[in-house]
Amino acid sequence: MHLLLVIRYFFYLAMNWNFRIAFHITKEELRGEKKYGIQSTGADELKTLDNAGIDITHATIYMPASYDMLENIFNQLDCESVKHFIDIGCGKGRVLCVAAHFGMKKISGIDFSKEFCARAKLNIEKVKTNLPHLQYKIHNNDAFYYDIPPDADCIFFFNPFDKVIMSGVINNINTSLEEYPRAMTIIYLNPMSKELFIAIGFKEIYHVKKLNYLEGCILKRER
């Protein structure tokens, strides 16, 4: 990872949260990028999308999930039994790459940025060299209009947008589950709209919180 990028990311975190968070996440960035062999660090790059004419009204800032939080969450699941894992708001593909390392064999990512989608593909291709049976697709699409595939049984969110878009996405998930009844697992980091999932029958089965700001949960809805 480029030293200047690490320094910029550290001070971005320190200014927006605190130095304790900054040290923790930066350390995890260095460890995780080396472990998984990808390049996905960055912050607040949605400004470049706005300048390119892409509507970011309902989007939150781009910031990848901390590697230790991802590993903690994935360790709670039987990842090899997941049929189709989807990351909605996949950014540069970090979560998809980690999911593949944990044994998920079919993965998909959705993001409204063509640049992020392109970088996600590059990262996943690096991972695929060691996991040749991995199947993946990256969709450059608005999550609000994305139809949930009938085989999708595990979906990831890192608070990628506000409740306006999230409400539409949850409606799409509910529609898919009603048309094709099945169990569904939701992995949700920084779960600002968790109550919307609870309202359609999901139950929280795991919760973790670190350093007051790093938070995640697993929600499950049975068939």
Image: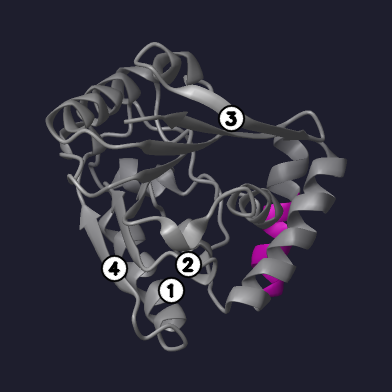
Mark 1 and mark 4 lie on one chain; the one further toward the N terminus is 1
> Which residue appears at 53% of the width and 21% of the height?
192
* Numbered disc 1: secondary structure: helix
Residue at mark 1: 123
* Numbered disc 3: secondary structure: strand
Question: Disc 2 vs disc 4: Cβ atoms closer than 8 Å?
Answer: no
Mark 1 and mark 3 lie on one chain; the one further toward the N terminus is 1
Q: Amino acid at mark 2?
A: Cys
Residue at mark 2: 97
Question: Disc 2 vs disc 1: Cβ atoms closer than 8 Å?
Answer: yes
Question: Disc 1 vs disc 3: Cβ atoms closer than 8 Å?
Answer: no
Residue at mark 4: 136
Which label number is shown at residue 88? Answer: none
Mark 4 nearby-residue class (10 Å; few <14, some 14–19, many ≥20):
some
Q: Which residues are magenta?
A: 1-10
Q: Amino acid at mark 4?
A: Tyr
Q: Nearer the viewer, mark 2 or mark 1?
A: 2
